[in-house]
Amino acid sequence: MKNIIHPDRDPAFATGAYSDGIVTDGFLFVSGQAAVDFKTSQFVLGTIEEETARTLDNIAAIIRAAGGSMENVVKCTAHLSDINDFDRYNAVYATYFPGIKPARTTVQSVLAENIKVEIDCIVKLPA
């Protein structure tokens, strides 16, 4: 059994063949998220710090919609358009995970729409 999770957002934005999140067997799988304003469905480009914060805020909204919190994240994969932004991205990322840090992979990738960061994650939801 799979349940689709969408935060409170403009449904017209999800034009791709994906769901924001899928819950199955107590886990939430969050699709790659970026610096998007969920109310307007527009990318909000900015510094790596700004885009990282908005991306993680979007992830947090999806996790809350599934009944969890950022403390439940067990794995993240982050794609940076420029790996030289790693230290600045990492400084913001660390503030979202003050306790036990999730397992993580960070790579440089070619990203759409001139975004600087895209992050997906796996979450173990509370019982």
Image: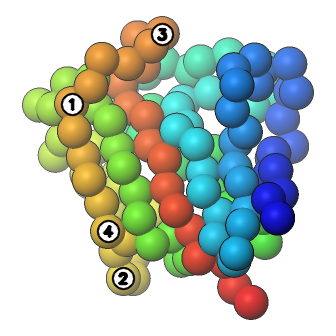
The single residue placed furthest to the front in the displayed view is: 1
Callout 2: SS: loop
Residue at image point 52% right, 32% down: 34
Q: Nearer the viewer, residue 51 or 20?
A: 20
Asked if labels 4 and 3 touch by Cβ distance under 8 angstroms, the answer is no
Q: Residues within 10 Å of mark 4 (few under 14, many from 20)?
A: few
Q: Residue at x 28, y 32 (%)?
A: 80
The type of residue carrying mark 2 is Ile
The residue indicated by pointer 2 is 100
Reply above or below: 13 against 25. Answer: above
Provide the residue designation for mark 3. Answer: 113
Can the viewer see residue 57?
no
Residue 81, by quadrant, is top left
Which residue does the numbered mark 1 point to in the structure image? Answer: 108
- Where does the image place residue 89, in percent across and percent down from the top left? 28, 43
> What numbered label is drawn on residue 103?
4
